[in-house]
Image (tube, rainbow, N blue to C red):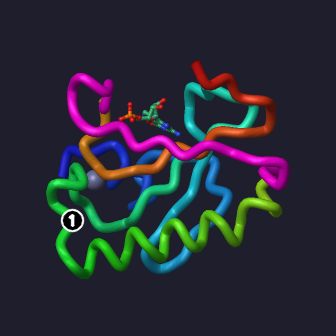
Amino acid sequence: MDCIFCKIIGGEIPSAKVYEDEELVIFKDIHPMAKIHLLAVPKEHFPTLAELGGERAALLGRTLQKIGALAPSLGLEEGYRLVVNQGERAGQTVPHLHIHILGGETLGWE
Ligand code: 5GP
Ligand code: ZN
């Protein structure tokens, strides 16, 4: 499949991984928008939340749980922001569901 994140998951494209298990990988974003900018990417390929059935919803729940548990060890103990871009007008450029994790500094909200 011609998907950048599937290629990263498969090891075809290198990435700076900070966490990996059987269903999830977390790696550094190549164009960081904050001092810490990670991408939490379920290994299963599906583009958006519109394709979220029951098992994928559980996968996403576990993903959020893992982000919460891992945050202190990733330098995010003082707070962080999650962003999930959906579709063209949100600027989603990679059609493989992913959660941006932004932190390491005080983030504006306006
Ligand atoms: P989106 O705009 O789809 O929500 O986010 C895609 C993100 O993937 C962008 O922030 C972009 O910088 C990141 N990205 C795109 N290609 C690569 C890559 O090859 N390696 C890494 N580590 N990040 C990438
Ligand atoms: Zn993919």
Work out which residue is located at the far top of the displayed protein and give it.
110
x, y (%) of residue 62?
Answer: 48, 76
- Near-viewer residue (109 or 71): 109
Task: Tally the marks.
Answer: 1
Rendered residue at 24%/55% (across/down): 49
Q: Quadrant of residue 103?
A: top right
Ligand 1's image quarter is top left
Q: Secondary structure at mark 1?
A: loop
- Near-viewer residue (90 or 18): 90
Whether residue 76 is in magenta: the answer is yes
Boundaries of the magenta span: 75-92
Mark 1 Cβ inside 8 Å of ligand 2 = no
x, y (%) of residue 54?
Answer: 22, 79
Q: Quadrant of residue 34?
A: top right
Q: Amino acid at mark 1?
A: Leu
Q: Which residue is mark 1?
A: 52
Task: Establish if 73 lies above or below 82.
Answer: below
- Near-viewer residue (103 or 32): 103
Left or right for 6, reference 16: left
Left or right for 92, reference 61: left
- Quadrant location of the C terminus? top right
Rendered residue at 40%/43% (across/down): 84
Task: Establish if 109 lies above or below 45.
Answer: above
